[in-house]
Each structure stands twice: as structure tokens, then as C-alpha cells.
Amino acid sequence: MIYLDYQATTPLAPEAREAMLRWLDGPDGTGFGNPHSAHRLGRRAEAAVELARDQVAALFPPGGRVIFTGTATEAINLALRGSEPARAGKPLAIGAIEHSAVLDTALDLPGETTLLPVDREALLDPQVPLPEGVGLVSVMQVNNEVGTVQPIAELYARAKAAGALFVCDAVQAAGKMPLAEADMIAVSAHKFHGPKGIGALWIRDGIALHPLITGGGQEQGLRSGTLSPALCAGMGAAAQLALARMEQDAAHVALLWDRALELFSGWRLNGSADRRYKGNLNIRREGLDVGRLMSDAREVMFSAGSACASESGKPSRILSAIGLTQAEARGSIRLGFGRYTTLSELEQAADMIKDAAAQQE
Ligand code: PLP
């Protein structure tokens, strides 16, 4: 089996696993404490959570705080639903190719939502006009389906000039590249070799939010509920490792990307060739039956469109937004690779995929 679906999730780093084990049980059996208890066992667990918070905070720009959540979806919901402009029913503007965590949340809010268009390269225009009276703008740093990197610095400046809050879904960027400035940034541990079941929202100092989950008042009153020290420790270790290895990982991914372009030279690339994260290769071939391809090349774990959309059987909303025809979108596959993918795995997978595609000719 060869795993090429790094946008859906990434393998747990051994270092993150090691950090977690201590807080699941621990050699002396004292790792199970509630981090919100006042006694020694609790304080130890709390120290682990706070260490992890500092490690995760290092991913973000200075001048903010980290709130742990269950997922990035929850972090995005907290940022959007909990924000003052959204609660006041002010207009929202979001990128046209946002993840459904942003799109469906924005559409569920009382203010009108404008979709900021992307071009055929899957890029937003940094000069895109924002709607009159906009209260909140949300744009992702790296797209999950096609890997394009949006001009976040310019969009953030425009949102500020319009008096709006700016939220960035950095799920696919975190741990892979420096995160751009924003007012709030959402990330998910399992996309950078941490565990599933934990995400975080970074909130710039001075920004007030209303909680979605009320109760014991944990996470500075913004997200009640007992934290899992093991998940926090795993996320913290994964963040620390990703920061330490950022250049090394990027160089490895670039090497894989160059080889992947050679291996799939007859295929067309979806999304910008240069303004992108190179661990995401979204390509298409005319007339390809991707369902059949996935079944014939079943030893390769890859995706048709995004992992979220592929179960619905509908052509990807993102590929349609960048102007692909339904047939082009249906003939597209996404290969995601990263830190633990070897060149030989990539080559073997490409052989299997290309052989399966050739059987369709
Ligand atoms: N945003 C983007 C860009 C994603 O790729 C994903 C997951 O695929 C999410 C948000 C949601 O993340 P989570 O599954 O942690 O809620």
C-alpha cells in the first residue's frame, strides 16, 4: 500500500506518538490527570498542556493566543460564529474555493455572504473588491484540493482597510510554511503529523469572541470541556518538529514534485504551477473514469477531488469554480505526498496509476 493522500490526513510522527504516550498512561501510571484539577496530578497534566500550547503558538505570528479545539472545523466555527461582526449580522466575504467548514458556516450566519472569485489558476485577485460594509473576510492560505497559495498578506491589509476582521483557514499550510498575518487562524494537528481529534484557533490579542461551547469555562472561557493532555502533547510535538524541519521537509517535497511532474508529463495540472504548495499534485486526463482508476490502482491511496467531496459522487465544487468542465473535473485526481513519502513509493504509485489509466484507452 502506498499512501498519497496527505491533504486528507498525514501519518502520525513517531515523535508526536512518543509525546502522547506519557499522557495516556505513562511509565509510572500518572499520566491520566485532569489538567483542570488543582492537585499535583492535575498540575502536571496542565503543565503538559501549557508546554504544548507554547509549541503550537510558535507556528503563528507573535501577538496572539492559542485556543485548543477538537478540530479545525470547530476552530473555524468559533472564529466565524463567535465573532462580533458575524453575530451582528454584518456582511461576510469568503474565497470561492474555501473548505466547506468555512463556506457552510458562513452561509449559516445571518449576514449576506459574498464569494470572492478565483481565476483559472485557482488564485484570488489581491485587489478583489470587498462588499460594502463587510464585517468579516475569510480566505484560506493553501487550498486543500489544488494546493494554491492565496495572497493572504494583501487580502489581510484590504480587510483591515475596510474595517473587517480577517480569518485564515491555514489547515493545509500549518507546519509547511510560515503562516501569514490574520486576526484569527485555524489549524488541525493531523494535517502536520499530529493526532486526529485536536485543532487550534489562534486569536490576535484584543479580538473578542463569543464561545460556542459553554460550561466549565476552560480555554479562557472560549471552549469549555476537559482537554486531552495526550492530544495537546501530540499536537505540540508535531508543531515543534514541523517548525524544526520546515526547510528540510519543503526541499523533500520539492524533489518529489519535480519527479511527479516528469512521471505524469502527459497529464494537465489543475491550479497554478508556481503559486502553490508542492505536496499537492492535482492533475487530469481527458476521458478518465476516476472511479474505475481508483479501483484498478487500489494499492495506491489517493483521492478524486477532495476527500470530503469524493464520497458525494458530485464533481468538485472547487474544480468547477476554476472553470473546469464537468468532464475535466471528473477526470481529475489528487496525489498528496510529504515528509514520509519516498521517491521510490512515488515512482511505483505513478506506474500503477498510469498502467490503470492506459487500460482505459
Ligand atoms: N480546512 C481545510 C482547508 C481542510 O483541508 C480541512 C480538512 O480537510 C479542514 C478545514 C477541516 O479540518 P478538520 O478535519 O480538522 O476539521
Image (tube, grey):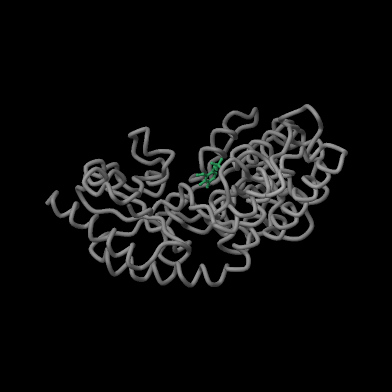
x 79%, y 45%: residue = 46
Q: Pinpoint residue 40: horizontal percent, then vertical percent.
A: 85, 43
Q: Pinpoint residue 203: horizontal percent, then vertical percent.
A: 74, 48
x 72%, y 53%: residue = 52
Q: Quadrant of residue 307?
A: top left
One can see residue 271 in this view: yes
In terms of depth relative to the viewer, which is nearer, 5 or 193?
193
x 63%, y 58%: residue = 239
In terms of depth relative to the viewer, which is nearer, 73 or 138?
73
In terms of depth relative to the viewer, which is nearer, 297 or 289?
297
43 relative to 350, above or below: above
x 67%, y 43%: residue = 25
Q: Pinpoint residue 313: horizontal percent, then vertical percent.
A: 33, 34
- Residue 273 relative to residue 133: left or right: left
Outermost residue to the front: 28
In terms of depth relative to the viewer, which is nearer, 181 or 35?
35
- Residue 256 relative to residue 296: left or right: right
